[in-house]
Image (cartoon, rainbow, N blue to C red):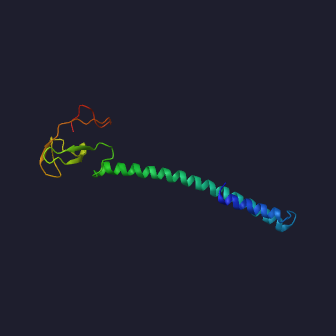
C-alpha cells in the first residue's frame, strides 16, 4: 500500500472514530471527499508505476541511441565489442585496436606509443553479422 493510500485509510478511520454521521450534510460531504481522495491515491499510484516503466524504457532507448551514435559518427569507443588488444613488437606497449578503424587498403597500423609501423595480418574472430571468419581486417 502506498503512502497516500495509508493516509486516506487513516482519515477514513478517523472519520469513523469520530462517529461522523452520513445522515448529516457534513457527513455526506466528508464521505464523498474521502472517496475522491481514495480514487486520487489509486490513480497516483498507477501513474507512478507507469512512470517507472517508461523511465526504464527511456533509459534503454538512451543506451541504444548512444550505441547507434557511436557507430554512425565513428566515435573512439566501439559499441560492438570488436576492440582487440595489440602488443607492439618494437616497444612492447599494449593498446586497443578496433578492426573497423583500420584502413581497408593497408595491412599496417602505427603504434600510438613509438609511432613505428606494425603489420597486421589477422581475421576478426567475432561472430557478428558484419564479419566473417574469412574476412581480413
Image spot of residue 15 (x, y percent): 80, 64
The reply, left or right, for residue 41 in relation to residue 110 is right
Asked if residue 39 is positioned above or below residue 24 in the image, the reply reads above
Asked if residue 52 is positioned above or below residue 107 in the image, the reply reads below
Q: Residue furthest bottom?
A: 26
Q: Residue furthest top?
A: 134
Image spot of residue 58 (x, y percent): 47, 52
The reply, left or right, for residue 24 in relation to residue 82 is right
Return the residue nearer the eye: 86 or 109: 86
Please identify the quadrant where the C terminus is shown.
Answer: top left
Return the residue nearer the eye: 14 or 137: 14
Q: Residue furthest front?
A: 92
Q: Residue at x 82, y 68 (%)?
A: 26
Return the residue nearer the eye: 61 or 107: 107
Q: Residue at x 52, y 52 (%)?
A: 54
Please identify the quadrant where the N terminus is shown.
Answer: bottom right
Asked if residue 82 is positioned above or below residue 73 in the image, the reply reads above
Q: Residue at x 34, y 51 (%)?
A: 69
Q: Quadrant of residue 107?
A: top left
Amino acid at each position: 500500500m502506498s503512502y497516500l493510500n495509508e493516509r486516506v485509510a487513516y482519515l477514513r478511520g478517523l472519520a469513523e472514530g469520530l462517529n461522523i454521521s452520513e445522515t448529516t450534510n457534513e457527513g455526506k460531504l466528508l464521505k464523498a471527499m474521502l472517496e475522491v481522495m481514495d480514487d486520487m491515491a489509486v490513480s497516483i499510484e498507477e501513474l507512478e508505476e507507469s512512470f517507472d516503466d517508461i523511465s526504464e524504457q527511456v533509459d534503454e532507448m538512451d543506451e541504444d541511441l548512444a550505441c547507434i551514435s557511436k557507430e554512425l559518427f565513428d566515435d573512439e569507443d566501439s559499441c560492438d565489442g570488436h576492440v582487440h588488444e595489440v602488443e607492439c613488437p618494437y616497444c612492447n606497449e599494449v593498446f586497443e585496436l578496433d578492426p573497423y578503424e583500420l584502413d581497408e587498403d593497408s595491412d599496417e597500423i602505427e603504434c600510438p606509443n613509438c609511432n613505428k609501423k606494425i603489420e597486421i595480418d589477422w581475421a576478426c574472430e567475432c561472430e557478428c553479422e558484419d564479419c566473417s571468419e574469412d574476412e581480413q581486417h
